[in-house]
Image (cartoon, rainbow, N blue to C red):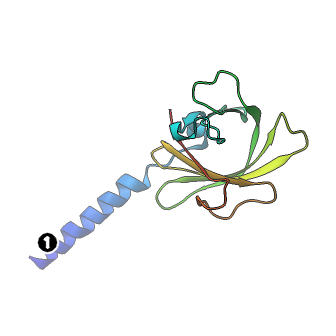
Amino acid sequence: MKNRALILVVILIFATFVLFAGKKISIEETYGTWVNSEYNETGKDAKWIINPDGTYKAYRSEKDTDPAWTGNYTVTDSWHDRKGNLWIKRTFDTVFLEDWIGYELSKYSNSGKVWEAVWQSSGYPTEISPLGGTYAIRYRQ
């Protein structure tokens, strides 16, 4: 009886591992529209559109038709953690601020529905945390 229970537990653990280890979001799945309604008119950009060519548009409100700014992303590193979340280090520049480069650390959930990011103007952030002022969370639209 103990052997059967042990075998069943091993099979369940293996099945869980196979189910969740196989789900990984790709960089291509990060393209598209990301929003956070709570950011509308608060000073944080409520909507971002990221294009496959690396360009992006940021809007103060979800309903805005003219972007607050536009720019370019360049991926410098990416990896998946054990949960299948995608982490990306990328630089970005804005069209409005010439010769300015920012450094961003992003985390996309393995479901492809949540994007968390922090940025700074000098070197890459080492963690994603709501503390520090540049944290943002957006959701797949």
Q: Residue at x 55, y 38 (%)?
A: 29
What x and y, as percent, mark residue 19? Answer: 35, 53
- Residue 2 occupies quadrant: bottom left
Q: Residue at x 68, y 64 (%)?
A: 126
What x and y, as percent, mark residue 62? Answer: 57, 29
131 shown above or below 58: below
- Residue furthest to the left in view is 1
Count neighbours of disc 1 (C-alpha within 10 A) and say few if under 14, some if 14 to 19, many if 20 or more: few
Residue toward you, 22 or 71: 71
The N terminus lies in quadrant:
bottom left
Q: Residue at x 52, y 40 (%)?
A: 38
77 shown above or below 37: below
- Residue furthest to the right in view is 99
Q: Is residue 117 left or right of residue 8?
A: right
- Residue furthest to the front in view is 42
What x and y, as percent, mark residue 26? Answer: 56, 44
Mark 1: which secondary structure? helix
Residue toward you, 61 or 97: 61
69 shown above or below 89: above
What x and y, as percent, mark residue 73? Answer: 74, 41
Q: Amino acid at mark 1?
A: Arg
How many marks are shown on the rendered structure?
A: 1
User: Which residue is disc 1 drawn over?
Assistant: 4
Residue toward you, 14 or 126: 126
41 shown above or below 116: above
Q: Is residue 102 left or right of residue 64?
A: right
Q: Is residue 69 left or right of residue 23?
A: right
